Image: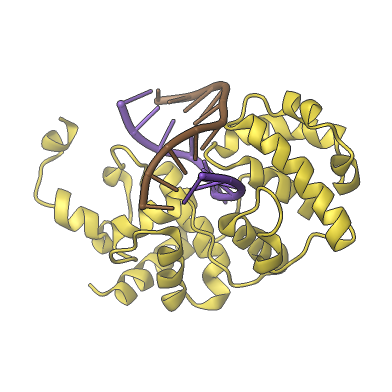
Chain colours: A yellow, B purple, C brown
Amino acid sequence: MTRKERFDFIIKYFQEHNPNAETELLYSNPYELLVAVILSAQCTDKRVNMTTPELFRRFPDMPSLARADKDEVLVYIKSISYPNNKAKHLVGMAQKVMSDFGGNIPMTVAELITLPGVGRKTANVITSVVDAQPNMAVDTHVFRVAARIGLTVNAKTPLATELQLLKFIPKDLVYIAHHWLILHGRYVCVARNPKCDICGLKPACKYYQQHLKNTTIADNAL
DNA sequence: ATCCCGAGGG
DNA sequence: CCCTCTGGAT
C-alpha cells in the first residue's frame, strides 16, 4: 500500500468514526488557546486543563498577563512540566504581543515564533485553529503515529514529518487530520504497547503489517 | 523507567 | 547536532 493509499484509507476511517475531532484543551478565545498550547509542551492536556481555569480567572487577557509577576504565574502552573520556564515565557510572550503587535496575537508562523515560548509546533496550532491556515502542527503523537502507520518515511525531525504530511493531505483536511492523529496517538496508538487490538487502521498500518500480523494474541500479551 | 499537543540555548 | 528544563501519571 502506498502512502497515498494509506492516507485515503485513514481519512475515510476517521471521517466515519471521528468527524468532529478537535483539541481537548480548554479555551474560550485565541489568548487562552495560545497560553494553553504553550503550557502543553511535554505535558498532558488533562493536566493543563486542571490549571488553566484559575489562571485565566486571575489573568483574563493579554494586558493582565503582560503586567503579571512571573512568580505569581508560577504559583498557578506549578504542577505542570517546566513551570519556571513556562512562567517566564508566558509573561514574556504577553509583553511582546503588547509591545510589538499592539496587543493583537500575530497570525503568521514567522511572527508567532518570535514570541517567547512559541516554536513552530505552537505557531502551527494557533494559525491552524484560529485562522484556518492549512498548517500541520507536529507534536509527539503526530510524529510517532505518522511514522508508525507509514504516512511518513524516514522522517527524523518534526519538520520533515510536517512537510511529508502536507504533500498529500488536502488543504481543507489539514486541520482535522492533525487532530485525528493526535487523538489516535493519545488513546489507541500510544507510545508504549500500542492498542492494535482495538485499532481500525490495521489494514493500512505499516507497523501492524510488519510486526503483529503473524503473531498471536498470546504472543502480544507477553 | 518512560512518556506527555516543545522550546531555548550552546 | 546536543543539552536542559521539570511535575505527574503509568
**Depth order, front residue of A98/C4:** C4
**Depth order, front residue of A102/A4:** A102
| Quadrant holding the N terminus of chain A | bottom left
Toward which corner of the image does residue A130 lie, by quadrant? bottom right
User: Residue A13 location in percent, x, y?
Assistant: 40, 63
**Depth order, front residue of A48/A123:** A123
The image shows residue A133, relative to residue A211, as above or below, that is below
User: Residue A185 location in percent, x, y?
Assistant: 42, 48
Q: Which residue is painted at 45% across and 43% down in the image?
A: A186
Does residue A199 appear left or right of residue A161 in this picture? left
User: Residue C10 location in percent, x, y?
Assistant: 40, 25
Does residue A169 appear left or right of residue A68 in this picture? left
Toward which corner of the image does residue A72 lie, by quadrant? top right
- How many numbered circles does the render carry? 0
Q: Which residue is painted at 61% across and 45% down in the image?
A: A24
The image shows residue A218, relative to residue A6, as above or below, that is above
Q: Which residue is painted at 77% across and 54% down in the image?
A: A30
The image shows residue B10, relative to residue A137, as above or below, that is above
| Quadrant holding the C terminus of chain A | top left
Toward which corner of the image does residue B9 lie, by quadrant? top right
Can the viewer see residue A128? Answer: yes
Q: Which residue is painted at 26% across and 75% down in the image?
A: A2
User: Residue A178 location in percent, x, y?
Assistant: 51, 60
Can the viewer see residue A28? Answer: no
